[in-house]
């Protein structure tokens, strides 16, 4: 077990990111789906470690708004963005033929050889994330998982974005609190818009 902060749960997001960079870089990456939480993390990382790597799992069916936000991230933050291809050569993913397993497989490729990864998970997002620790051992993958924004409220995220005039996905302004692939995402609070009408709120990446 690595030497940790005295109490990761009491550390600020910036302190936890600085710790992660000092302890794990360059065997460290940040998951990025170009949602509002990643706007915050990308900004913080650009100030702490401009060479820190983000990775996006590209299913080939991302919203046009998400692709536009991706471009704005590149222009504003300048962080390296690694693209993990999770598209289907047989045709676009659909709601009936979900990309979930392809995303999980893509995540495994992205995390290969790393010591730690960073996510934008917040406890407020839903019951499946309510117990998220800021720093925990990802036993399934044998590395460390950091969620610096775990204790942030939705309001705190927006206050930070507006205070620093950060780019963010415009779908949030259209009622999408959680943004995934276009075929499986509708407007909704929390993660209600993900696979709406189904008994599912996670694709498997964070299970």
Image (cartoon, helix red, strand yellow):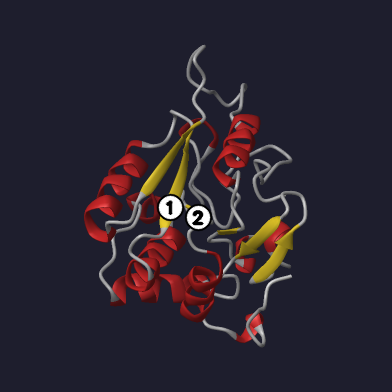
Q: What whole-number distance in Å separates the C-alpha atoms at marks 1 and 2?
A: 6 Å
Label 2 Cα neighbours within 10 Å, binned few <14 / some 14-19 / many ≥20: many
Percent x, y for residue 69?
31, 48
Residue appearing at x 53%, y 61% in the figure? 120
Q: Nearer the viewer, residue 61 or 85?
A: 85
Q: Residue furthest left?
A: 75
Above or below — where is 199 with respect to 157? above
Q: Is residue 60 left or right of residue 23?
A: left
Residue 54's mark?
1
| Residue at the spot of label 2 | 29
- Rendered-image quadrant of the N terminus: bottom right
Q: Nearer the viewer, residue 42 or 4?
A: 4
Above or below — where is 65 with respect to 43? above
Asked if the residues shown at circle 1 and circle 2 are in contact, with their CB atoms under 8 angstroms apart, the answer is: yes
Residue appearing at x 63%, y 83% in the figure? 5
Above or below — where is 89 with respect to 83? above
Residue 4's mark?
none
- Residue 107, image quadrant: top right
Percent x, y for residue 94?
54, 23
Label 1 Cα neighbours within 10 Å, binned few <14 / some 14-19 / many ≥20: many
């Amino acid at each position: 077990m690595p030497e940790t902060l005295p109490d990761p749960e009491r550390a600020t997001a910036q302190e936890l990111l600085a710790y992660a960079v000092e302890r794990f870089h360059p065997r460290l990456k940040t998951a990025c789906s170009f949602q509002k939480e990643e706007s915050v993390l990308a900004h913080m990382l650009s100030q702490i470690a401009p060479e820190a790597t983000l990775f996006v799992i590209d299913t080939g069916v991302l919203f046009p708004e998400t692709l536009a936000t991706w471009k704005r991230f590149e222009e504003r933050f300048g962080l390296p963005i690694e693209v993990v291809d999770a598209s289907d050569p047989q045709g676009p993913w659909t709601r009936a033929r979900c990309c979930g397993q392809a995303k999980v497989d893509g995540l495994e490729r992205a995390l290969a050889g790393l010591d730690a990864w960073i996510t934008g998970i917040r406890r407020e997002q839903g019951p499946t994330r309510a117990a998220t620790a800021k720093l925990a051992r990802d036993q399934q993958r044998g590395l460390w998982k950091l969620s610096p924004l775990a204790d942030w409220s939705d309001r705190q995220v927006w206050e930070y974005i507006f205070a620093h005039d950060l780019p963010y996905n415009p779908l949030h302004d259209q009622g999408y609190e959680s943004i995934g692939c276009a075929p499986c995402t509708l407007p909704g609070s929390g993660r209600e818009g993900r696979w709406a009408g189904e008994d599912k709120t996670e694709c498997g990446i964070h299970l």
